[in-house]
Every structure is written in C-alpha cells, then in structure tokens.
Amino acid sequence: MSTPAAAVRTGAALREAAVTARANWSITASAAVLAGALAAIAPLVLGGAVATDTLASGAYLALAATGLGFCVGLAGVPSLAQGAFVGTGAFAAAHMLRHTALPAEVCALVGAMAAALLGTAAGFAVRSLDPVRVAVGTWLLSWLVALSLAALPWLSGGAQGLVVPTRRLFGLNPTPLVHYELAVLLTGLCALAFVALRRGPFGLDLAAAARHRGAAAALGVPMERLRVAAFGASAFVGGLAGGLAVQLDVVADPTAYGPLLSFELLVAVLVGGATAALGPSAGVIVLGLIALAARALGSLASVSGSRFQPMLEALLLLAVLTTGGSALVPAVWDLARRFLPQREGRHVAARSGPARPAETLRAASLTKHFGPVTAVDEVSFELRPGSITALVGPNGSGKTTILRLLSGAVPADSGSIELGPNDLTTRTPAERVHAGLVRTLQARAYFRELTAREHALVGVDRTRRNGGGFRTLFSTPLFRAENEEADGRAVAALEALSLAPRAERPASELTGAEQQRLMIAAALATNPAVLLLDEPSAGAAAADLEQLIGLLASLRARGIAILLVEHNQALVHAVADDVLELEQGRIVRRTPRRRN
Amino acid sequence: MSLAVQVLFTGLSAGGVYGLVAIGHSLIYRLTGIVDFALGDLIGLGAFTTLLVAAGTQPLTQESVSGGWMALAIVVGLVTCVAVGAAGYVAVVQPYIGRSAIGWVAGTLALGFAIHAVLDASFSRPAYVFPDPIPFHRIGHDGLVTILGAEVHVRAFAVLGVAIVVATAASWVLQRTWFGRSLRAIADDADGAAIVGISVERTRALAFGLAGGLAAIAVVVAAPGAPFDTGSGALLGLKGLVAAVLVRFGGLWSAFAAGLALGVVEAALGTGLLGHLPGLASYRELIPLLVAIVLLAARPLRVREVVE
C-alpha cells in the first residue's frame, strides 16, 4: 500500500466522520461538552471553597463510578466489587512505583490491568445470569480484598499503608490540579466510550439480555461473553482510577477500599443514573454535596462528619428506591426534552441480508430423559427448505422439548442434528443461530423497553462481522458501513412481519399478537435457514390469525424451512405441508399434506 | 491434644453464632429468592439495642446490670431487630422481588449501611464490653474449666448451647407451627401459598425480622467475651453468608452445621493447629471466603436455573 493513497483514504474517512458527527450532533452532545468544560474549569471557579486535591479525589471517584456504569448501566448487573477493583489498581500501582523505576503512567496502567484481570475472572465466575450469584459473588470478592489488605502486611504495608514515591505525570509536575484535569479528561473519554458501546451491538445485546434472558438466548446473543467483557472493562477503569488516585494521595491506605467504597460507588451510579453516560459523575457530585452536609451535621453534634456520611448516602439511596423516583440525569433529561424540538426519525430503506444457501435440517433419533421420564424418544424428521412442518400433540407430549433440543437450550441425551453439511449436535445456542437455526419462545418473551427496531437489530447483530467492541469504540469506517446495512436489514425484517409502522414503539406498547410477530421478526433478522416457532398464534384474534397465515406463507416462499409447534388447528390446516403428531415423546403419525 | 480441644470448643462457640446467621440467610433466600445484605447489621442493631437498654452508651462494669433488667434489654433488642427487619422488607425488598435485582441489592445494602451508620453515630467509642446475662466468672476458675488438659471458657459452652437451643426452636417452629408451615409453603411455591390463603408478604416480612433476631440472641450471650464494635455485626453477616453459600442455602440443619464447621476451621487455621506454616494464621478468614467464591462460581445455587 503506497503511503499517499493511504493518506488520501484516511483523509476521506476523517472528512466523512466529521460529516457524520455534524449530522448526528444533538443537544445532548452540546450539553455533554458544556458539562465537560464546566468540570475542567471547576478548580478555578471553586477556588478557595474546596481544596483542589479534594476535587481531584472526587474526579477519580467519578472515573471509577463511570467504569461501574459499564456493569450496572450496560449489562444491568449489580456489581458490588468496584471498590475492590479500585483497591487492586491502587495497590498494584503502589507496588510497581515502589519496586520499579517505571513511569507513573505505566504503573497506573499495570494497576488497571491487574484490576481488569481480577474483574474478568470475577465476571467469568458469575457469568450465569442469576443475579443472586452475581451480587453475592461480587460482595464476597469485595470483602476478600478488604480483609486481605487488613490481614496481610506484605500486601498492604500494615496499618500505615504503603508510601508511594511521586513521579512526573505525562511530563508534568503531579500537582493536584494536574491530577484533577487528567481525571476529568479520562472520565470524559470513559463516558464517550460508554455512549459508543451503548448505541452499538454490544450495548443493545446486553440491554436485550438484561430484559429477557430466555429470549436473548434464543436469538443467539452470547450473553456470557458480553458480560465477562463488561465486568473486565468496568474493573479496568476502576483499577486505572485507583492506580492514579493513589499517586495523588501519596499513601495507599489499606482501609480505604472496603465494601463501603463499593457501596458508595453503587450509590453514585444509581442516584446519578446508571443508563446515562454522565449519570455516575453527577452521582459523585451529589456524594460530594452529602459529604459537605455531613461535615456540617457533624460539627453541630460535635462528632466527626465521616460518621454521618454513609448514613446520608444510604438514606438518599433508600429515598430514591422507596419513592420509585428516577435517577438524577435521566430525570433532568426527561424534563428538558419536553421543551426541546423532537428530532425526526430518519427514513431507512429496507435491505436484504446476504443470501443463505437453502439447507435441510435433519434430526435423527433425538432422545431426552428427565429423570425417569422419557420426554423425547427416538424422534427423527427432516425440515426441507421452503416448507412448513407442524408439530402437534397434547400437552406434555414433548413438543417444546424438541424445540429446546434443536435450539440447544438443553442437550440431547442421544441423537444428532445436522443442518446441510454442518453437524450442530454439540454446538451452543449462539453457534446454532450463527449457522442458521433460530427459535422463538412460547408466550410473550420480549425486551420490554426496547423498540421494535431495536428488537430486529438484536437479531441482525448475530450476523455482523464488524460490530465488535473495538470497532464500536472507534467507530471505524467498516463499522459505520455495516451499521447502515444493519439498519436496512432490521427494517426489512419488520416489513416482512408487517411491523414497519411500529418500528419506533417500545415492545411493551404493542398488542399481544404484534409482540409475537415482533419476536419472529427478530428471529428472521438473524437471516435463518430454519425457523422454529413455538405457538405463534397464542393470543391472536381471528383477524390476527388471517394475517399470520399470510405471513408464514410468505416466509415459506423465501425458502426458509419452518417448524411450527401449534395448538391452533385452523393455522396448522392452513399452512402446514407436513404434520407430525407426537404422543408421549414419540412421533405416532406423519401426514404429508398437499400444498395449495 | 489440649490444643485440639481448645480449638474445637472455641471454634464451635464462634461457629454456633455463624450457624444461626447462616440459618437466617438460608431461610430468607428460600422464602424470597434474594439475599439480605443487611442481615449482619440487623444483628448488630439487636445487640447494641440490648446494650443501650441495659447500660446506656457509657462505659460499664460487667456486674452493673441486674438479671431482670438484662432480660428486658434482650427482649427490647429482639423486638427492635424484628421491627426494623420487617419494615426494611416492606420498604426496600418487596417492591423489587422478581422485578429488579439491582433494586433489592441496593435496597438491602443501603439498609445495612444506614443501620451501621446510626450505630456508629450513637456508639462512638471504638469497642464495647457487653454486660453479661449469665455470671460466668462465678463458674469454675473465674469462668474457665479444664477439659482433657485444655482450659475452656464456660461461655463457649453457653454460646454453643444457646445456639443449639435457638436452632432447635427454629426447627420446631418451622415443622410444627402454622407460621412454620406457611413459611415452608411460601418457600415451595409462593403463588400457590397465596392461593390457599397465606398472607405471603406479611409472613415474609416477619421472617425477615426474625432471621436477624435468631442470631442476635446468640450474639448477646457471646459478645461479653470479647470487645464488640459497630462493625462486628456486618462481619457476622458475612461469615453467615459464607456458611450459607457453602451449603447452597440448604436446609436449616445443614446451614447450622456449615456455620459450626466454618468456626472450627477458622479457629484451627488461626491457632496453627494445621501445622505451623508461616503466616497461615493471617489467612484464617481469607481461605473460607475464597472457597465460598470458588464454589459459587462452580455450581448454580438452585438445582435448576431456569433458562429457556
């Protein structure tokens, strides 16, 4: 590649990025820039009122809280270990500074890496979506770090802590002001990363998983991987804050990183707003005001203000929780939006996805036992491209279990599942979706607050190749190009299920029948070869049923192989090409029907 | 031998308290599907309320409290514990059950830290010596008896005894009373229990308070043996949680047994009974915690975690 050509291309990409940025510039962006500018000049404005090193400590706290936002805001996971990650960063950096001659920034980075390592391990440990395990696991971790620092003098330097040598920071004398500006800059960058990730596939997939894990799993969202990444990122930022703050404090204090710090960071995130990029920072400012109030209260009662601070923080959080009040930044934002002109939704033309070869699914001798019960017994069948196979039978005959075996939600005891040349028998649900086998759930399993368009995008995300975290963060040209295509494909999927006019509505506002169709649209957006539908007629009125018949026929016409688990005889009669009757886990009758 | 005996009884005595806290955690988890992070501080509240009624916040000599007054103090402590626990459940837990994990996690944490902070502001000295409900120093040699060559505090027996009695009483209540049957019905199937006319939320709220009260009784017996500070409750809550996690929030007696085992293991690690590895004693609290985290990561809490 010749250098001038590369330079031209880079220049073009930059120009394009600038144009996109201008087109997408909003009042939110202006508000954020204003907030950043105000934060940067705060030490000058507040002058003698608040000491600069207090402000700098607060700014590092804001950085750690913004990091916690990745876990709480993006992944919806209650992490109680952020204080432990900050502590890990602080002590790792302190040891590096004491025992090596490495530059200060490198030591802080080592601290961040150490915290990220611990965070990734913790994220891996609690990767299942059971919130009790996440909360208990991170709580125990937070105590483990606190008690380790208390009990192990070689680690923490004993009761006096570790004295940290000061070194120049980015060539500057490390004054509190330099620390403060650095912390504000890093917090701003972290908030930008939060916004980028939240808008991209990473944030959308996590949002879907937090709202309905079963539906997200059925669409092939790799939840565990995403959550481990969110934990790791969260811990990295926390560790970075710790590694830098310890250089400001000059002493690494072993008692400063206990469960109380984790709690305070959580309070900041929840009070400020977990889903807003600047929410955690706003929360930290509130904590700062609380500290001032606590000091005033303390001087009234002639006790140290630090005794009142946790109480006021806890009461504030309890007040927010018990009144069901919304967090600070989202509340202000909702209020502001009433007075601001609404931006028109941009029209996106439908686009079709890459062609997928029509392939036959072959299930052979599938068997599943639950204890002494044989739920599925040596079941074999084929799903041909462009055909609808109905699976019927009484309750408990094994219909849904067959769907779960096919989608990989439960492993089969024996038997095999092949899609064209691919053996999917031992693949995970996410891998099966990738291979072209996707399932919808019985009942209304949807992602409440997400819009119809976002539902379809979660499906489209499964086929993206340039939607990873790194590309999302830096909004690479490939990422942006793919974004356009993804939007188009989401529109196409919604149009296929007659949902295009509802694209910007939250799923919870749709009718029951629309919600059923919405999840089919999301499944269709994964560009499947085989579609497994569990009771799509549930809750459908007569008119809805007519529409559903037409829609299923049109999906068949696209060459998709459809397996329909259905109680509604009218629907089965109207669309099925083959009917498999199931009784006690066995196929008792196969009825080929002539297509009209 | 004498060291082993000493470790065993010290450990069992500490473990009895852990066991009661573990029963509380287990009971709450089975009833509501959540973990109460305020449980430890609730126990601290019970203990310090007892102290407040018995002796105020001033320094005291061990014999300055009469038996009747002490009994009243314990009752007031328990009632406070149950009332605050039940109110906490109604205010910050019930609205979030099954809806928002972040809600109940943050709610119980905030409740715990609020209780801790109130205690901290009211009891400002670093540590407190509790009055003794039972005059142990009059038994044996100034409260010590010799068993198999080991000197053991009489208090250790009393704490263990009280713990066993409380656990037995709790088990009896669970098995034999209407309240206990309601609790078991809710743990089994809350919706079903509601249909047959059990007031699910009222029962759960009461259980939330009683869970703290259970352990507070043992703490009041154990506390005079060593300085007790406002953070001790939270630490007990943690130890009970570790024990409960070790048995996956299992039944009453397995949670109690896990607490006893945790106490003995800590005592054994702390006294160097398991060989004099350098510095092993400083790991006595860390090792069980690490084991609990690993177990939590390795196995799901329920037999079936429902994921479609």
Image: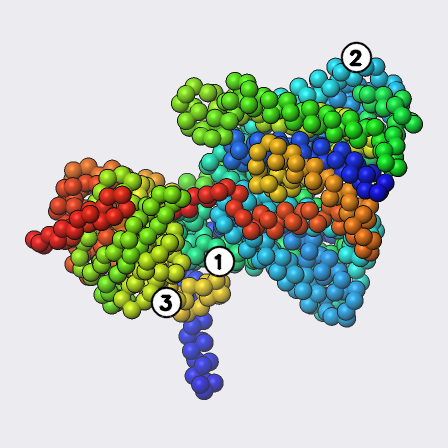
Chain letter belonging to callout 2: B
Residue lying at 36% horizontally and 48% vertically, measured from the top left: A369
- Residue A24 image position (x, y, % from top left): 41, 58
Q: Is residue A307 above or below residue A110?
A: above
- Residue A179 image position (x, y, % from top left): 70, 58
- The part of the image, by quadrant, that contains residue A232 is bottom right
* Local SS, label 2: helix
Q: Nearer the viewer, residue B120 or A141?
A: A141
**Quadrant location of the N terminus of chain A?**
bottom left
The answer to whether residue A260 is left or right of residue B146 is left
Q: Residues within 10 Å of mark 2 (few under 14, many from 20)?
A: few
In this rendering, the label closer to the viewer, 2 or 1: 2
State the separation of the CA atoms marked 3 and 1: 25 Å
In this rendering, the label closer to the viewer, 3 or 2: 2
For the view shown, which residue lies furthest in the right direction? B141
Which three-letter amino acid code belongs to the residue tagged 3? Ala
Q: Residues within 10 Å of mark 3 (few under 14, many from 20)?
A: few
Q: Is residue A455 above or below residue B7?
A: below
Q: Residues within 10 Å of mark 1 (few under 14, many from 20)?
A: few
Residue that badge 2 annotates: B68
Which three-letter amino acid code belongs to the residue tagged 1? Arg
Label ID, residue A481: 3
- Say yes or no: labels 3 and 1 on the same chain: yes
Chain letter belonging to callout 3: A
Which three-letter amino acid code belongs to the residue tagged 2? Gly
Q: Nearer the viewer, residue A481 or A288?
A: A481
